[in-house]
Image: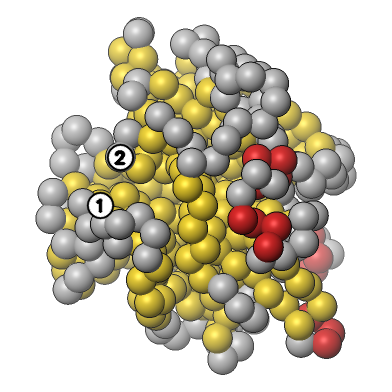
Amino acid sequence: MLAFLVAVTLQGAPESPGPIERLVRIAAGPGVRDNPAALATPAGVSIVWEEVRDDRYLLMLGGTDTSGRTVLPARVLIGGWGHQWGPSVAARGDTTWLACYQADRSRRTGDRDVVVLRYRGNFGAPIDTIRITNDPAGSAFPWNDASPSLVLTDRRRAVLAWSTGAFHEERPFARAYDDKDIVAAEVHGSAPFRFRKLTTGLERGREMSPALARWNSPSGVRYLLAYLSQVGDGPYALKLAVFDGRWRLRSTRTVAKSTGGLARPSLLVLAGVPYLSWVDNTTTDVTVARLTRWLRIGPRMSLRAALRTTEFSSWGPDLAGLSGARLFEDAGRLALTFVATMEYQPAAGNVRQEVFLATLPR
């Protein structure tokens, strides 16, 4: 598993690194971990992440209590057949929603599908599991559906966006899943409906790792979609697309490019203001971005530099790789959860990837 750093930019913030108000280590010690997703509740902050146990990727649940400092004991949330990855979480009333994708290891090419699970309370008793994707009828090879991003709307519905990969048998195996697009669907009751393709699919490119947010903009309801794109062997690009409330595309533009690759972006609308973060593997630096009303990027702040003002350096190396950062709201404040790779020597069996929560001041 590669280690990445996240860039977070705050418009209106100073050029120098901003302070971190609170830093909590959620999961420590040896282990392969990635892609945390956080949810603030009256009882504290719940965090779901991927972790390898017994040669399988499981979804773990941990977090803090109401004091904001005590780490709750981590437990296996989902550990069924195959692997489970890419959690995205949301809550409304007495229901918590979790989207993820899972794989059946019995099939040669994976067969990854997106599912939504609902729980009573804060990941309490399970309510149901909603299967979002199935392979097309008659397909000779499995389709790979991955990396869901979940948003709850005002109409008691959930909206998901995810990447779907088409298999081309005539292509070399390493590039077989060379055509990826972003798809969205709504969930009402216990079934998905209104499936939409959000990217064009006009070329065999790779549109991946979507981040979705709903924004009550000055011009009305907008859906913001950030995703990664690569065509052929060209550079990776981070794109930001804007849709209106009826899912009509209003604009698309490139936010960043990197020849070394980009990792999963994150979107958050906080007090009516959209924020965007992403990972550039070339610079391996975290840069937290507040977007203007015209969705432009403002000044930048380095997460790595900000961590140097905390106790982070006493837990691991200053240049520890950071990955999987996701923005979320914590009691009206901008917060993020991320993974720090403190040690990575898989051949020797020495891997220590730890999960953190960081909150910025109001």
Q: Is residue 90 left or right of residue 69?
A: left
Residue 350, given in percent of the width and then of the height, sits at: 76, 82
The total number of labels drawn is 2
Q: Is residue 8 left or right of residue 258?
A: left
Q: Of the residues under marks 2 and 1, which one precedes in the sequence?
A: 1
* Above or below for 171 versus 186: below
User: Which residue reaches farthest bottom?
Assistant: 54
Residue 166, given in percent of the width and then of the height, sits at: 62, 56
Q: Which mark is residue 41?
A: 1
Note whether residue 12 is visible. Answer: yes
Mark 1 surroundings: few (<14), some (14-19) or many (≥20) residues within 10 A: some
Marks 2 and 1, how far apart at CA: 9 Å
What residue is rendered at 55% in x and 86% in y? 53
Q: Amino acid at mark 2?
A: Ala
The quadrant of the image that shows the C terminus is: top left
Which picture quadrant has residue 110? bottom right
Residue where numbered disc 2 is placed: 331
Label 1, secondary structure: give it.
strand
* Above or below for 31 versus 141: below
- The coloring applied to the image is secondary structure
Q: Which mark is residue 318?
A: none
Q: Amino acid at mark 1?
A: Thr
Q: Nearer the viewer, residue 260 or 25?
A: 25
